[in-house]
Image (cartoon, rainbow, N blue to C red):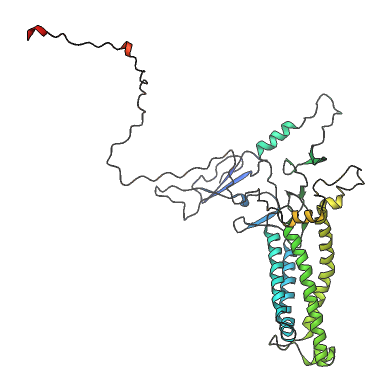
Amino acid sequence: MVSPSGTSRSGLNSPSTSLTSSSSGGRYSQLELDTSASNSQGRGGSEVIMPKKKWQVFPGRIHFYCDGRIVMARQKGVFYLTLFLLVVTITLFFAFDSPYLARKLSAAIPVVGAVMFLFTMAALLRCSFSDPGIIPRATADEAADLERQIEVPNPDNPTYRPPPRVREVNINGQPIKLKYCYTCKIFRPPRASHCSLCDNCVENFDHHCPWVGNCVGKRNYRYFYLFIVSTCVLSIYVFACNITTIVLLSNDQGGFLEAIKKTPARYPFPFYLTPIASIIEALICFISIWSVLGLAGFHTYLVASSQTTNEDIKGTWSSKRSQDNFNPYSFGSIVTNCCAVLCGSFYPSVIDSRGYAVPETQVIPQPPRPSNPYPSPLPPTPTHPYPRQAPPQPYNATSVVATYPPSNMNSH
């Protein structure tokens, strides 16, 4: 191991080696190198040191899974509760209500429910597992360059106060202030904010949602909106099926209490079904409808007006701040704003979580090339370069003088 002060503890021949970069404020201040038994021995018997990837040393309170492909917050308990409620409700629906309604009314009822459930789960998992738009932190050189650009305090004047670390840009005629993040050492882009739970700056930060276990930002807001809308529709659909099942059973058995007595809750499902399961589903769906319906309506308003939850709460584009204040990101049309959010281009991730975390001050040692057991019969190529010859001179007829040996013509 190599300590932060640079003192070697066990050398490079230890099973794991940790190299610490000299720049503490860099994007990746520590590079940890591993040597595995499978690839550590080359042909020459030397060890190959493999660097760790960026997701393994990424700062902030987030977790990566599947080699950096999945990004989630550390607090995932409420997310598991969301999955539990969805799976339990839809399981009760397919075990009790769906077979009865398919036999009584139409076989399309379970098919529609399955399609809606799969769409809801796909939107939830895509929103929860996606990078919400995390902005990488500044490297040591970038942070030092920003510090040089910011005016330093005047030591001669004790009452001098440095200016606030704010920059101003103009977007569609509206001045917008860019605030400096002391944690990430960057000037945050417009509409970005630092999440206190994930400890990272997120582009187009909307809010941190514990129900999905992730931040909601530029790259996953579309799936978050589809999730809450589809959950609301699925809850209404299952609730309507529950009420229909209870009404049909009560009519068949001569009353609600008689239906409970004559159809007890016992295995096997689904032919002997009880309205108790429908009542449990109806209660879950009823609570979900009133909570998710209001949330879906609020985010529909945000999508139509091209705002985020953070901007709406703070009143960023409210006319109360100034008469000339307006939203520069709105297209001026509800349909265009909705299409921009739901049908716009997909933005790639900028954190490069699967790349190798190589600090600028460290060089990864390369493994030695194996010696060739079969030498070539040709002679070795000389290592010294050949002397450069002078370039040929152009031909000039006047400068050429032909000389011939004397001949004795009279001798013959």
Quadrant including the C terminus: top left
Q: Left or right of 93: which side holds 389?
A: left
> Residue 58: percent from the left, percent from the top?
65, 49
Look at the picture and state if 123 lies above or below 114: above
> Residue 354: percent from the left, percent from the top?
59, 51
> Residue 315: percent from the left, percent from the top?
87, 49
Which residue is rendered at x = 58% and y = 49% of the image?
355
Which residue is rendered at x = 50% and y = 42% of the image?
365
Q: Left or right of 294: which side holds 392?
A: left
- Number of labelled discs? 0
Is residue 236 in sight in this rendering?
yes
Q: In this view of the protein, which residue sits in the foreground, 171 or 350?
A: 171
User: Which residue occupies the extreme top position in the image?
Assistant: 410
Residue 212 in which image quadrant: bottom right
Is residue 213 in sight in this rendering?
no
Q: In this view of the protein, which residue sits in the foreground, 233 or 279?
A: 233
